[in-house]
Image (tube, rainbow, N blue to C red):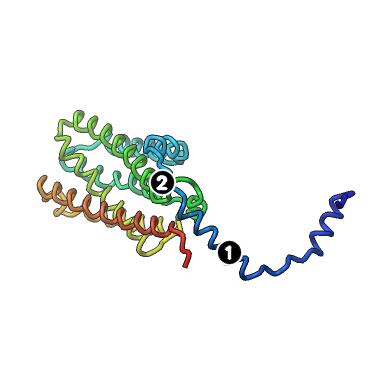
Amino acid sequence: MIFLKNKGQLKNILHYYKVPEPDEKEIEDTVQLGQQQMRSLLPSRTTYSTLFKTQIRYITPYLLWAQLFIVALFIIFTLNISQPIKDLPKIIFLISPIFSLVAVLEMVKSEIYNMSVFEQTSKYSVAKIMLTRAIIANAINIITLTIILIYLSTHFQLAFLQLILYGLVPMNIMNGLSLLFIDVFQVRSKIILTAIYLSLFMLNFALVQSKFFLSLSYFTWFIIFILSTIIILIELYIFLTKMKNREKFQWN
C-alpha cells in the first residue's frame, strides 16, 4: 500500500506512469461481451406524457419571448390600417413565419450546438426528443397565432378561416425550407441561417406587394396549405429517420 503525503506526489506518480499496451484478445473479448449485453437488453418504454413533461422543462425562454415579440408586431402593424381586407392578409403573411424560425431552431438546437452526441446517451432517443420538441414548439405557436387571429377577425369582421390560412401557409413553407437547409445542406451556422431567413423575408415582402398575392382564392390557399403540410411531414419523417439510424450502434 502506498501512502501519499501530498498532491504533488500523486501528480508525480501519474506523470511517470505508463499505461501498458492492451492485449488484442482482451479487446476482442470486451467487444463480444458488450455485444452480448446489448442484445440481451430489453428496450425501455417511456410514456409520451413523461417525455413531454421532461422536455417542456428544457424549452428555451427565447420561445416565449418570441411569442411576446410577435404579438407586439401584430399590435403595432394593425393599429392604423386603412384597408383591412387588403392590408391584414399581408401583415399576417409577413409576420407569422417568425413563429416557424423559432420552432425549427428549438427542435434542432442540439444539432446546431453539436450536442446531439450527448443526447444519444440518454434513455430517450434523439429522434423522439426532437419530435417532442417540434410538437411542443409548434403547438405553442399555433395556439398563439389562433388567439391573435380570432381577435383580429372579430375586430375587423373578417373570416377567421381565411386569415388562419394566411398564417399557416407561410409557417409551413418556412418550416419546410428550414428543415431543408439544416438536414440536406447541413447548415449549422446561426449567421448563415439568419442571412437565409432575411432573404426569405425579403422574398415574402416582394410576394405580398404583387397583385398575384390577393388574386389567389380561398380554395387555392387551402390546396397550398395541404400540399405544404404533406411536404413537411415527409421532410420531418426523413429527418427523424436519419437521426434514428445514426443512433444505432455499429459493431461491424
Amino acid type, mark 1: Asp
- The local secondary structure at tag 2 comes to helix
Instruction: For residue 251, say whether it is visible.
Output: yes
Pick whichever, 44 or 224, lies toward us. 44
The residue depicted at 39 percent of the width and 40 percent of the height is 66
Q: Position of residue 111 (x, y in %)?
A: 45, 55
> Of residues 102 and 85, which is closer to you in this image?
102
Horizontal and vertical percent position of residue 52 = 39, 37
Q: How many marks?
A: 2
Q: Secondary structure beneath disc 1?
A: helix
Between label 1 and label 2, give the one nearer the viewer: 1
Disc 2 residue type (three-letter): Ile
Residue 175's x, y, as percent? Answer: 31, 51
The residue wearing badge 1 is 29
Q: CA distance from mark 1 to mark 2?
A: 34 Å
Q: Mark 2 = which residue?
A: 129
